[in-house]
């Protein structure tokens, strides 16, 4: 050991030598901690004692120990050595204390070493603030600039590879003050060359008044062995553009930074820019003991006052990861929230705006050993508003579904089985959970039998970290059980059916209103199994003419070339629910004939009291009458009326018909032309929406009431499970009844209606909790 010195105490002419130090060296020369820490175990050198004289030392000499208990720095047992410094004290000249401790093996370059220290709390709080240290020293009253702490690292040959000191704060990336989960302070040094020993010196500025003495307690120094560990070991904070006024008012600081790594989500650090300038920012930094795997993620738990969490914060709150001094990831909260909503089904912004405490993962996708949460300055933010950081830790990466065709969302036919597997994952296995968070199994895949309802499952990667099972964030896997289409769910209806010879017929896929098909997709085929699909057009040779079947860009089928009384070929309409293969195939029913009568326009127009129909035809044969039909579904038709024409004169004609009682909502109409020979041909089917307000569709009569009142349904719709309530002028319910059913164009008598006091009442009709009719009734 170079420059080794035994501690000798001189007092009253008595000589004492402590042997405990030899025992300590003997038992600890090759020790390593069980928590992955490799300690500096060799006492290389330390400041010699100072011999001084004074009145109390007239008959003997006195010794000042500049370094007390130097051997205490070689073990992690809560003990420490104390280093003194002063420009001069009680007749002494100035002195600075130092201690040099060494590792058994050379420490590789860029390996962080941590030196636990204690002393002036305000000084270390200022140094913990990084580049803010100088400003914060003015607020705290720290001795920054008066007490100077120097750290030097030496290589194996004694050459200096790092020389940093605390004068003016710590802005260098090679030395910082950090804090552990217990609130203890450490110097963190990162020499860029291999090193073997470290010297810690406690110095005094020449500007300090005489008889001022500074102390520095040094507990131990260590670096980490690359063992399995996911928790950050240390924190610090930093800031930029923060004013002294803001710091003095309590803004622009981080409170209790150690709470964000203490393993207790109920505690938190508090990060705020307060009254920072427009360019200001505040960061909390987290240090990990080893470099992460590329797939590792950071799990962050934060909360905040909803008044603080606004759109400005979402773009000004950033998460940054570093590999050494190299930035490898930088994402703001707003962009991150969009990713999490798709992957984890986590409404991050919504929960934060509700004041919730939210835990979410961040995926740098590159190795990292340091993590930063940074808030840029916010306008109009009070100094007491802050972002709470409850916990930060590293986890193994989430399972990935990126290479899967369906990602993390699956769609299958009702009743089918499904096997779910991520395309890749880290760790040693996968753990599966149901939507309520209950554990349901471990395995490479989740096998589901006969899925009949939409479900959401969750999967996490897992790994063993020195006997502790670790889990990643859980990825949401959405499973949609899609209904298998049935024949009654759809049909092909003529959209534009101009029935003259050689004219085009267009068949339009029609989906019933109650089909409950989530993602309907139609296509056409000549095959009863729906394969192959008709793409573009197909020409069928009929001998004396051709018939062309053409799929239009909107999915309709256009048929060109049919002659009078000709049947179409066997063509099939296929309804598929999404891309799952859940499909139904049905032959197209020919509900038209090709006759030498040309249909022109067929239009519907809503009036105040109903629907007005108008159609135009070219008359190249005699027509006996027109039959007008209506359907609410497009399948079952009812006759509304007839127009007797009985005209054998050829030419053109325009015709009108009024439907005075349409249903509220969709109505479908068609017209049948009956010629003088009794032959029938159909117009196209058109849809008309009747949007008359509900409150015009129901009424109470008689009004004023002089007998039992009746509820009138003035629509063509059947209504079930209605609630009728009557309210007096104070809004108090004075009448309440349930109505099981009221038929179209009918009424029911309110037999149980009590006789009310004379006055005006409001009758409200409810359907599924919503008011669909409101009437003022006079009693």
Image (spheres, rainbow, N blue to C red):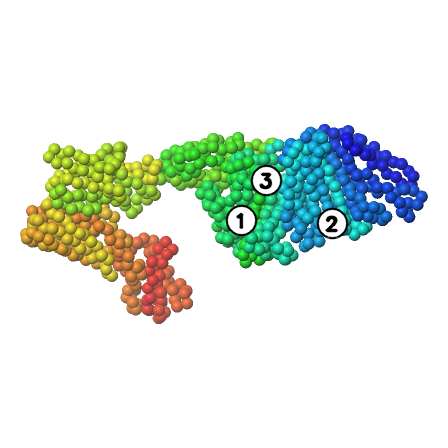
Up-down relation of residue 383 to residue 396 (above or below): below
State the mark number for residue 325: 3
In this orientation, which residue lies closer to the viewer: 343 or 710?
343
Up-down relation of residue 417 to residue 727 (above or below): above
Looking at the rendered image, the quarter that the N terminus falls into is top right
Give yes or no for contact between labels 1 and 2 (Cβ–Cβ under 8 Å). no
Return the residue at label 1: 317
Looking at the rendered image, the quarter that the C terminus falls into is bottom left
Q: Residue furthest bottom?
A: 758
Q: SS class of the residue under badge 2? A: loop
Q: Rounded to the nearest whole Å, what is the CA distance between mark 3 and mark 2?
A: 30 Å
Return the residue at label 2: 146
Q: Is residue 250 visible to us here?
A: no
Q: Residues within 10 Å of mark 3 (few under 14, many from 20)?
A: few
Residue at point 57%, 51% (across, down): 281
Q: Position of residue 641 (x, y in %)?
A: 16, 54
Residue at point 24%, 33% (across, down): 528
Q: How many marks?
A: 3
Residue at point 79%, 33% (across, down): 3
């Amino acid at each position: 050991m170079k420059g080794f010195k035994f501690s000798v105490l001189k007092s009253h002419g008595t000589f004492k030598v402590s042997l405990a130090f030899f025992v300590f060296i003997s038992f600890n020369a090759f020790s390593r901690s069980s928590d992955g820490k490799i300690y500096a175990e060799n006492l290389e050198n330390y400041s010699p004692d100072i011999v001084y004289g004074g009145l109390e030392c007239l008959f003997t000499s006195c010794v000042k120990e500049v370094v007390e208990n130097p051997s205490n720095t070689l073990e992690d047992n809560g003990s420490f050595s104390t280093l003194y410094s002063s420009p001069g004290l009680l007749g002494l000249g100035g002195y600075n204390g130092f201690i040099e401790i060494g590792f058994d093996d050379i420490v590789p370059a860029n390996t962080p070493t941590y030196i636990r220290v204690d002393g002036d709390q305000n000084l270390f709080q200022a140094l913990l603030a990084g580049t803010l240290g100088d400003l914060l020293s003015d607020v705290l009253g720290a001795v920054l600039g008066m007490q100077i702490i120097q750290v030097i690292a030496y290589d194996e040959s004694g050459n200096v590879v790092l020389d940093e000191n605390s004068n003016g704060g710590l802005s260098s990336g090679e030395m910082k003050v950090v804090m552990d989960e217990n609130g203890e302070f450490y110097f963190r040094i990162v020499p860029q060359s291999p090193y073997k020993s470290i010297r810690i010196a406690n110095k005094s500025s020449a500007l300090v008044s005489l008889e001022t003495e500074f102390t520095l307690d040094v507990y131990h120094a260590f670096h980490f062995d690359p063992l399995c560990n996911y928790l950050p070991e240390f924190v610090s904070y930093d800031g930029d553009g923060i004013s002294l006024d803001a710091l003095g008012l309590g803004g622009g600081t981080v409170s209790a930074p150690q709470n964000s790594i203490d393993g207790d989500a109920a505690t938190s650090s508090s990060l705020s820019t307060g009254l920072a300038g427009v360019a200001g920012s505040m960061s909390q930094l987290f240090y990990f003991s080893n470099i992460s795997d590329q797939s590792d993620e950071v799990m962050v738990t934060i909360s905040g006052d909803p008044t603080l969490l606004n759109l400005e914060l979402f773009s000004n709150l950033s998460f940054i990861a570093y590999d050494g001094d190299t930035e490898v990831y930088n994402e703001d909260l707003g962009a991150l929230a969009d990713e999490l909503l798709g992957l984890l089904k986590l409404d991050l912004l919504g929960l934060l705006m509700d004041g919730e405490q939210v835990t979410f993962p961040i995926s740098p996708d590159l190795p990292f050993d340091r993590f930063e949460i940074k808030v840029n300055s916010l306008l109009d933010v009070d100094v007491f508003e802050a972002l709470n950081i409850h916990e930060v830790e590293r986890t193994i990466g989430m399972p990935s579904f990126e290479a899967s065709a369906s990602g993390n969302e699956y769609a299958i036919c009702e009743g089918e089985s499904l096997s779910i597997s991520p395309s890749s994952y880290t760790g040693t296995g996968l753990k599966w959970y149901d939507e309520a968070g209950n554990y349901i199994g471990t395995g490479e895949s989740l096998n589901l039998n006969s899925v009949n309802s939409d479900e959401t499952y969750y999967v996490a990667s897992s790994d063993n970290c020195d006997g502790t099972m670790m889990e990643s964030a859980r990825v949401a896997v959405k499973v949609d059980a899609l209904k298998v289409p049935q024949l009654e769910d759809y049909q092909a209806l003529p959209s534009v059916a101009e029935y003259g010879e050689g004219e085009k017929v267009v068949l339009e896929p029609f989906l019933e209103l109650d089909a409950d098909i989530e993602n309907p997709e139609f296509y056409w085929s000549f095959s009863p199994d729906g394969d192959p699909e008709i793409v573009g057009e197909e020409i069928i040779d009929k001998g004396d003419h051709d018939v062309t079947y053409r799929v239009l860009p909107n999915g309709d089928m256009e048929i060109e070339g049919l002659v009078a009384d000709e049947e179409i070929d066997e063509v099939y309409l296929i309804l598929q629910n999404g891309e799952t293969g859940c499909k139904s195939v049905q032959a197209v029913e020919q509900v038209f004939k090709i006759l030498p009568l040309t249909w022109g326009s067929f239009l519907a127009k809503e009036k105040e009291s109903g629907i007005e129909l108008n159609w135009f035809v070219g008359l190249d044969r005699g027509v006996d009458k027109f039959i007008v039909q209506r359907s609410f579904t497009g399948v079952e038709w009812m006759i509304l009326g007839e127009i007797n024409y009985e005209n054998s004169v050829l030419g053109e004609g325009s015709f009108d018909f009024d439907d005075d009682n349409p249903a509220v909502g969709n109505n479908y109409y068609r017209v049948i032309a009956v010629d003088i020979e009794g032959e029938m041909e159909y117009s196209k089917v058109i849809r008309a929406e009747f949007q008359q307000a509900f409150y015009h569709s129901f009424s109470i009569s008689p009004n004023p009431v002089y007998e039992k009142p009746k509820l009138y349904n003035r629509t063509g719709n059947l209504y079930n499970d209605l609630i009728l309530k009557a309210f007096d002028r104070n809004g108090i319910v004075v009448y309440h009844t349930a109505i099981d059913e009221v038929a179209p164009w009918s009424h029911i008598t309110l037999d149980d209606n009590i006789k009310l006091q004379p006055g005006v009442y409001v009758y409200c009709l409810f359907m599924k909790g919503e008011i669909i009719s409101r009437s003022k009734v006079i009693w």
